[in-house]
Protein backbone atom coordinates (compact mmCIF):
# COMPACT_ATOMS: atom_id res chain seq x y z
CA UNK A 1 0.00 0.00 0.00
CA UNK A 2 2.80 2.36 0.93
CA UNK A 3 4.63 1.55 -2.32
CA UNK A 4 1.50 2.35 -4.37
CA UNK A 5 1.06 5.66 -2.55
CA UNK A 6 4.68 6.65 -3.19
CA UNK A 7 4.32 5.68 -6.85
CA UNK A 8 1.17 7.80 -7.20
CA UNK A 9 2.88 10.79 -5.57
CA UNK A 10 5.91 10.38 -7.83
CA UNK A 11 3.75 10.28 -10.97
CA UNK A 12 1.79 13.35 -9.87
CA UNK A 13 4.99 15.24 -9.05
CA UNK A 14 6.47 14.29 -12.41
CA UNK A 15 3.38 15.43 -14.30
CA UNK A 16 3.33 18.72 -12.38
CA UNK A 17 7.00 19.38 -13.08
CA UNK A 18 6.52 18.57 -16.76
CA UNK A 19 3.55 20.91 -17.04
CA UNK A 20 5.57 23.75 -15.49
CA UNK A 21 8.65 23.17 -17.64
CA UNK A 22 9.17 25.43 -20.61
CA UNK A 23 8.37 23.83 -23.95
CA UNK A 24 9.50 24.92 -27.38
CA UNK A 25 6.52 26.28 -29.29
CA UNK A 26 6.77 26.35 -33.08
CA UNK A 27 4.57 28.43 -35.33
CA UNK A 28 4.20 30.64 -38.38
CA UNK A 29 3.18 34.29 -38.88
CA UNK A 30 1.19 35.20 -42.00
CA UNK A 31 -0.60 38.15 -43.57
CA UNK A 32 -3.13 37.22 -46.25
CA UNK A 33 -1.42 33.80 -46.50
CA UNK A 34 1.98 35.44 -47.14
CA UNK A 35 4.78 34.58 -44.64
CA UNK A 36 6.09 37.58 -42.71
CA UNK A 37 9.81 37.94 -42.07
CA UNK A 38 11.39 39.62 -39.03
CA UNK A 39 8.24 39.81 -36.92
CA UNK A 40 9.07 40.27 -33.24
CA UNK A 41 7.74 37.35 -31.18
CA UNK A 42 7.84 38.38 -27.53
CA UNK A 43 7.12 36.21 -24.50
CA UNK A 44 5.96 39.03 -22.23
CA UNK A 45 5.72 36.72 -19.22
CA UNK A 46 9.22 35.22 -19.50
CA UNK A 47 10.79 38.42 -20.91
CA UNK A 48 12.26 36.58 -23.91
CA UNK A 49 11.90 37.21 -27.63
CA UNK A 50 12.77 35.96 -31.09
CA UNK A 51 12.04 36.82 -34.73
CA UNK A 52 10.40 35.01 -37.60
CA UNK A 53 12.54 33.81 -40.48
CA UNK A 54 11.98 34.30 -44.23
CA UNK A 55 9.29 31.60 -44.17
CA UNK A 56 7.47 33.33 -41.33
CA UNK A 57 8.45 30.56 -38.92
CA UNK A 58 9.40 31.02 -35.26
CA UNK A 59 10.31 28.94 -32.21
CA UNK A 60 10.13 30.20 -28.63
CA UNK A 61 10.09 28.65 -25.16
CA UNK A 62 6.72 28.97 -23.40
CA UNK A 63 4.66 27.73 -20.48
CA UNK A 64 0.86 27.55 -20.20
CA UNK A 65 -0.65 30.99 -19.46
CA UNK A 66 2.36 32.84 -20.91
CA UNK A 67 1.48 35.97 -22.86
CA UNK A 68 2.87 36.13 -26.42
CA UNK A 69 3.03 39.35 -28.45
CA UNK A 70 3.60 39.50 -32.20
CA UNK A 71 4.80 42.88 -33.42
CA UNK A 72 5.81 44.42 -36.74
CA UNK A 73 5.73 48.18 -37.36
CA UNK A 74 3.61 47.86 -40.52
CA UNK A 75 1.00 45.58 -38.89
CA UNK A 76 -1.33 45.66 -35.92
CA UNK A 77 0.15 43.64 -33.07
CA UNK A 78 -1.36 40.35 -31.94
CA UNK A 79 -1.54 39.05 -28.38
CA UNK A 80 -2.22 35.47 -27.26
CA UNK A 81 -2.35 33.71 -23.92
CA UNK A 82 -0.74 30.30 -24.42
CA UNK A 83 -2.80 27.26 -23.48
CA UNK A 84 -1.70 23.70 -22.93
CA UNK A 85 -3.50 22.83 -26.15
CA UNK A 86 -1.30 25.30 -28.08
CA UNK A 87 1.79 23.62 -26.66
CA UNK A 88 0.52 20.11 -27.43
CA UNK A 89 -0.40 20.98 -31.04
CA UNK A 90 2.93 22.81 -31.46
CA UNK A 91 1.87 24.44 -34.72
CA UNK A 92 0.65 27.95 -33.96
CA UNK A 93 -0.55 30.04 -36.91
CA UNK A 94 -0.82 33.82 -36.42
CA UNK A 95 -2.55 36.03 -38.98
CA UNK A 96 -1.60 39.71 -38.82
CA UNK A 97 -3.50 42.66 -40.28
CA UNK A 98 -1.75 45.37 -42.30
CA UNK A 99 -2.16 48.90 -40.97
CA UNK A 100 -3.89 51.35 -43.31
CA UNK A 101 -1.44 53.72 -44.98
CA UNK A 102 -1.70 57.23 -43.60
CA UNK A 103 -0.93 60.35 -45.61
CA UNK A 104 1.52 62.86 -44.21
CA UNK A 105 -0.31 65.71 -42.56
CA UNK A 106 0.53 69.21 -41.41
CA UNK A 107 -0.37 69.88 -37.80
CA UNK A 108 -1.21 73.51 -37.04
CA UNK A 109 -0.97 74.35 -33.38
CA UNK A 110 -1.33 78.12 -33.51
CA UNK A 111 -2.49 80.66 -36.07
CA UNK A 112 -2.25 84.43 -35.67
CA UNK A 113 -3.86 86.94 -38.00
CA UNK A 114 -1.99 90.20 -38.56
CA UNK A 115 -3.76 93.49 -38.09
CA UNK A 116 -5.25 95.05 -41.21
CA UNK A 117 -4.04 98.65 -41.59
CA UNK A 118 -6.05 100.78 -44.03
CA UNK A 119 -6.10 104.56 -43.91
CA UNK A 120 -8.91 106.89 -45.06
CA UNK A 121 -6.66 108.07 -47.91
CA UNK A 122 -6.32 104.48 -49.17
CA UNK A 123 -10.10 104.14 -49.28
CA UNK A 124 -10.47 107.45 -51.11
CA UNK A 125 -7.89 106.44 -53.73
CA UNK A 126 -9.79 103.22 -54.43
CA UNK A 127 -13.09 105.08 -54.79
CA UNK A 128 -11.59 107.70 -57.13
CA UNK A 129 -9.98 104.99 -59.27
CA UNK A 130 -13.25 103.06 -59.45
CA UNK A 131 -15.32 106.14 -60.31
CA UNK A 132 -12.91 107.16 -63.06
CA UNK A 133 -13.77 103.93 -64.87
CA UNK A 134 -17.52 104.14 -64.15
CA UNK A 135 -19.63 104.93 -67.24
CA UNK A 136 -22.50 106.39 -65.17
CA UNK A 137 -20.12 108.61 -63.16
CA UNK A 138 -18.69 110.16 -66.33
CA UNK A 139 -21.68 110.16 -68.73
CA UNK A 140 -24.80 109.57 -66.64
CA UNK A 141 -25.59 106.44 -68.71
CA UNK A 142 -26.61 103.44 -66.60
CA UNK A 143 -24.71 100.26 -67.53
CA UNK A 144 -26.52 98.10 -64.90
CA UNK A 145 -23.42 97.65 -62.73
CA UNK A 146 -23.57 97.61 -58.93
CA UNK A 147 -22.30 100.83 -57.43
CA UNK A 148 -21.28 101.96 -53.98
CA UNK A 149 -20.04 98.45 -53.28
CA UNK A 150 -17.06 99.87 -51.41
CA UNK A 151 -19.20 101.93 -49.06
CA UNK A 152 -19.15 99.42 -46.25
CA UNK A 153 -18.07 99.95 -42.68
CA UNK A 154 -15.03 98.19 -41.32
CA UNK A 155 -12.58 99.05 -38.52
CA UNK A 156 -9.56 100.94 -39.75
CA UNK A 157 -7.49 99.97 -36.74
CA UNK A 158 -7.54 96.28 -37.66
CA UNK A 159 -8.84 93.31 -35.73
CA UNK A 160 -7.59 91.68 -32.58
CA UNK A 161 -5.22 88.78 -33.06
CA UNK A 162 -7.04 85.47 -33.08
CA UNK A 163 -5.45 82.33 -31.73
CA UNK A 164 -6.71 78.88 -32.68
CA UNK A 165 -5.63 76.12 -30.31
CA UNK A 166 -5.74 72.62 -31.81
CA UNK A 167 -6.55 69.76 -29.42
CA UNK A 168 -3.64 67.43 -28.63
CA UNK A 169 -4.76 64.06 -30.04
CA UNK A 170 -1.31 62.51 -30.35
CA UNK A 171 -2.05 59.79 -27.77
CA UNK A 172 -5.24 58.75 -29.58
CA UNK A 173 -3.30 58.51 -32.84
CA UNK A 174 -0.62 56.45 -31.10
CA UNK A 175 -3.21 53.99 -29.79
CA UNK A 176 -4.85 53.81 -33.21
CA UNK A 177 -1.49 53.06 -34.82
CA UNK A 178 -0.55 50.27 -32.40
CA UNK A 179 -3.84 48.63 -31.44
CA UNK A 180 -6.11 46.64 -33.78
CA UNK A 181 -9.73 47.72 -33.84
CA UNK A 182 -10.97 44.69 -31.85
CA UNK A 183 -8.28 44.90 -29.15
CA UNK A 184 -10.44 46.84 -26.68
CA UNK A 185 -13.37 44.43 -27.03
CA UNK A 186 -11.54 41.08 -27.20
CA UNK A 187 -8.51 41.70 -25.00
CA UNK A 188 -9.59 44.39 -22.55
CA UNK A 189 -13.18 43.07 -22.41
CA UNK A 190 -14.68 46.53 -22.80
CA UNK A 191 -18.12 47.22 -24.20
CA UNK A 192 -18.17 48.91 -27.63
CA UNK A 193 -19.68 52.07 -26.14
CA UNK A 194 -16.90 52.23 -23.51
CA UNK A 195 -14.02 52.33 -25.99
CA UNK A 196 -13.81 56.10 -26.59
CA UNK A 197 -14.46 56.83 -22.92
CA UNK A 198 -11.63 54.51 -21.92
CA UNK A 199 -9.20 56.13 -24.38
CA UNK A 200 -10.09 59.57 -22.97
CA UNK A 201 -9.57 58.15 -19.48
CA UNK A 202 -6.07 56.98 -20.48
CA UNK A 203 -5.29 60.24 -22.26
CA UNK A 204 -6.01 62.23 -19.10
CA UNK A 205 -3.23 60.38 -17.26
CA UNK A 206 0.09 62.32 -17.48
CA UNK A 207 1.88 58.99 -18.01
CA UNK A 208 0.29 58.78 -21.45
CA UNK A 209 2.51 61.68 -22.55
CA UNK A 210 5.67 59.72 -21.65
CA UNK A 211 4.63 57.02 -24.14
CA UNK A 212 4.72 59.63 -26.90
CA UNK A 213 8.40 60.29 -26.24
CA UNK A 214 9.51 56.66 -26.54
CA UNK A 215 6.65 54.46 -27.78
CA UNK A 216 7.03 50.68 -27.79
CA UNK A 217 4.48 47.93 -27.79
CA UNK A 218 5.35 46.49 -24.36
CA UNK A 219 5.10 49.85 -22.57
CA UNK A 220 1.82 50.62 -24.31
CA UNK A 221 0.36 47.22 -23.36
CA UNK A 222 1.41 47.56 -19.71
CA UNK A 223 -0.10 51.04 -19.56
CA UNK A 224 -3.41 50.01 -21.18
CA UNK A 225 -3.87 46.93 -19.00
CA UNK A 226 -3.11 48.93 -15.85
CA UNK A 227 -5.54 51.67 -16.84
CA UNK A 228 -8.14 49.02 -17.72
CA UNK A 229 -8.06 47.73 -14.14
CA UNK A 230 -8.50 51.30 -12.83
CA UNK A 231 -11.29 51.98 -15.33
CA UNK A 232 -13.24 48.88 -14.33
CA UNK A 233 -12.86 49.60 -10.61
CA UNK A 234 -14.07 53.14 -11.22
CA UNK A 235 -17.09 51.88 -13.16
CA UNK A 236 -17.98 49.29 -10.53
CA UNK A 237 -17.72 51.96 -7.83
CA UNK A 238 -20.10 54.25 -9.73
CA UNK A 239 -22.63 51.43 -10.25
CA UNK A 240 -22.55 50.52 -6.55
Image (spheres, grey):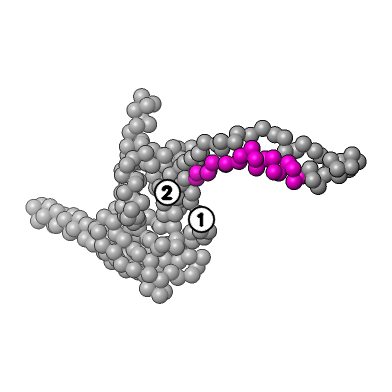
Is 111 left, or right, of 199 in this rendering? right
* Residue 126 counted in the magenta span: yes
- Which residue is drawn at the image coordinates 36% and 51% (left, top)? 212
Category of crowding for the residue at label 2, using alpha-carbon neighbours closer than 10 angstroms: few (below 14), some (14–19), many (at least 20): few
Residue 209 coordinates in the image, percent (x, y): 34, 46
Front in this rendered view, residue 11 or 47? 47
Residue 226 coordinates in the image, percent (x, y): 31, 43
Is 228 left, or right, of 97 in this rendering? left
In the rendered image of this protein, does residue 178 appear above or below residue 52? above
Residue 148 coordinates in the image, percent (x, y): 77, 36
- Helix, strand or loop at label 2? It is helix
Q: Nearer the viewer, mark 1 or mark 2?
A: 1
Front in this rendered view, residue 151 or 20? 151
Front in this rendered view, residue 109 or 86? 109
Instruction: Name the residue carrying label 1.
Output: 105
- Which residue is drawn at the image coordinates 49% and 49% (left, top)? 108
Q: Residue furthest left?
A: 2
Instruction: Name the residue carrying label 2.
Output: 170
Bounds of the magenta segment: 111-130
* Residue 120 counted in the magenta span: yes
Q: Residue furthest top?
A: 240
- Helix, strand or loop at label 1? It is loop
Report if residue 146 is visible in the image.
yes
Amino acid sequence: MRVKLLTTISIFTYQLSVSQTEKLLNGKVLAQNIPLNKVEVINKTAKTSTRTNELGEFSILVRPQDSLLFYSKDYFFKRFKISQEDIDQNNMVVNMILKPEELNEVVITKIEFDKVKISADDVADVLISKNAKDLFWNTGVNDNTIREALRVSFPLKGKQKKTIEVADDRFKKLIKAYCPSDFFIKNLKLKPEEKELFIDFCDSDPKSKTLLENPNVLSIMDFLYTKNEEFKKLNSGIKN
